[in-house]
């Protein structure tokens, strides 16, 4: 039996590689002689850089850049074996750089992401992948653009400040001083979600609260993104409203399209291509994927859906092993998922789940293997 194990990370507890190892351990308790192929995955969010650098024997470049609230932070980007640069916006503009009480998408900026792009350009790289998941921002990539020389001006001709709230002051976009090397550079955005920029399913409404926005702030931020889209169309002729994925990372994807002429691509699909996941799945008997939390947001392009899309193409059964399965997870059945198992064994706190994550994944994987074995017996 061939089993392909292709999970994402369990945020805050296990990397994708660690989840893969734990899953293998659980399945081998029941199917010790099976051929288990481990393909740790990512979707453009946290872990994408590590995943691709490791898979291609790439290298890491460290930098000090401007963090989401303007303080200097240590960040990095990767260089793959084909000289493509992989940047995670979360490294410079992510929630992981802030304490929960500091979350505030009205003020947070993507300026540091722009500084990482500039560093890559300075070193001569001209092919970039930008992974945009895990951001603390809702500024439509405005800070990123400012770091690369774009002037975002208010009605008085002054530069607007950092943050999502500052977009309300935007009156004119001037790209005359933008870094000229951008025109020579191919930029692909690895989107971890497919949300549009604005509206009910937009950046602010779906992800604003987890970045610290109150209901009032969510409504205001959505209006500010609407305003940004209007100015971008007026001054640059770029239309980003309604484009799937433009709402990723608080509209950073939209900003990358508007300012850097970037192309959007589902992150899980991009990573799968680099890892040649289709080649491994095409003759597999079972695929196991997973993520820390499965809910209604997972269908917008997270790792399990990306893996399921490939498994479905070959008619290969696929199951999810997740730390938590929440409301809305049932939507995944329409996207190719055959079954879902939670690692939680009875009532358990988040702290317990995180501290015992490896053990719980092993146990859940063993349970999945036992059910599979039972099904095989029934067929006889």
Image: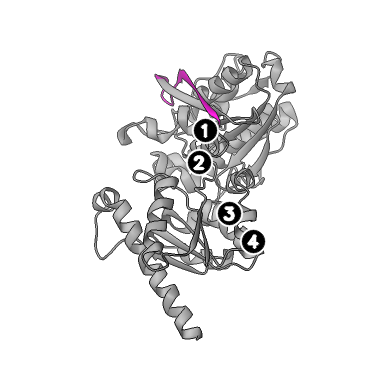
Element type where label 1 sits in the image: strand
- Residue at position x 46%, y 85% in the image: 378
Does label 4 or label 3 sit earlier along the sequence? 4
Label 3: how many residues lie within 10 Å, few (<14), some (14-19) or many (20+)?
many
Q: Toward the viewer: 244 or 165?
A: 244
Structural distance between the alpha carbons of marks 1 and 4: 30 Å
| Residue 358 against residue 91 in the figure, above or below | below
Q: Toward the viewer: 230 or 340?
A: 340
Label 2: how many residues lie within 10 Å, few (<14), some (14-19) or many (20+)?
many
Does label 3 or label 1 sit earlier along the sequence? 1
> Is 199 part of what is drawn in magenta?
no
Q: Position of residue 229 (x, y in %)?
A: 64, 35
Point out the stretch of residues depicted in magenta: 58-72
Element type where label 3 sits in the image: helix
The residue carrying mark 2 is 45
Is residue 264 found left or right of 88 in the rendered image? right
Does label 4 or label 2 sit earlier along the sequence? 2
The residue carrying mark 3 is 306
Q: Position of residue 337 (x, y in %)?
A: 53, 65
Task: Please state which of the two labelled residues, at mark 4 or mark 3, is closer to the viewer.
Answer: 4
Element type where label 2 sits in the image: loop
Q: Are marks 2 and 1 in contact (CB under 8 Å)?
A: yes
Structural distance between the alpha carbons of marks 2 and 1: 7 Å
The residue carrying mark 4 is 282
């Amino acid at each position: 039996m061939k089993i392909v194990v292709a999970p994402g990370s369990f945020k805050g507890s296990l990397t994708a590689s660690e989840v893969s190892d734990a899953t293998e351990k659980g399945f081998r308790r029941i199917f010790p002689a099976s051929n288990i192929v481990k393909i740790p995955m990512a979707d453009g969010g946290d872990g994408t850089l590590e995943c691709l650098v490791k898979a291609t024997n790439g290298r890491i470049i460290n930098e000090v850049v401007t963090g989401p609230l303007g303080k200097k932070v240590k960040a990095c980007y990767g260089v793959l074996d084909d000289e493509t640069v992989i940047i995670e916006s979360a490294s410079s503009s992510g929630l992981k750089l802030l304490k929960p009480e500091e979350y505030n998408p009205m003020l947070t900026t993507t300026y540091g992401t722009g500084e990482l792009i500039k560093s890559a350009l300075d070193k001569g790289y001209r092919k970039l992948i930008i992974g945009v998941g895990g951001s603390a921002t809702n500024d439509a990539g405005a800070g990123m653009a400012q770091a690369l020389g774009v002037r975002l001006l208010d009605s008085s001709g002054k530069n607007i400040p950092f943050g999502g709230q500052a977009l309300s002051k935007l009156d004119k976009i001037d790209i005359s001083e933008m870094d000229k090397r951008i025109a020579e550079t191919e930029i692909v955005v690895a989107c971890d979600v497919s949300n549009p920029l604005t509206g009910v399913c937009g950046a602010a409404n779906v992800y604003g609260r987890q970045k610290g926005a109150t209901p009032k702030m969510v409504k205001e931020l959505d209006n500010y993104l609407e305003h940004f889209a209007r100015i971008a169309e007026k001054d640059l002729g770029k239309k980003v409203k309604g484009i799937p994925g433009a709402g990723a990372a608080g509209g950073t994807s939209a900003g990358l399209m508007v300012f850097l002429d970037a192309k959007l691509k589902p992150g899980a699909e991009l990573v799968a291509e680099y890892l040649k996941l289709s080649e491994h799945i095409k003759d597999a008997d079972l695929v196991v994927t997973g993520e820390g939390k499965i809910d209604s947001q997972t269908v917008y392009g997270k790792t399990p859906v990306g893996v399921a899309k490939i498994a479905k193409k070959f008619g290969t059964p696929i199951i999810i092993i997740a730390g938590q399965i929440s409301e809305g997870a049932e939507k995944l059945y329409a996207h190719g998922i055959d079954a879902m198992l939670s690692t939680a064994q009875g009532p358990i706190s988040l702290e317990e789940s995180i501290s015992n994550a490896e053990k719980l994944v092993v146990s859940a994987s063993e349970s999945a293997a036992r059910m599979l074995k039972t099904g095989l017996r029934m067929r006889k």
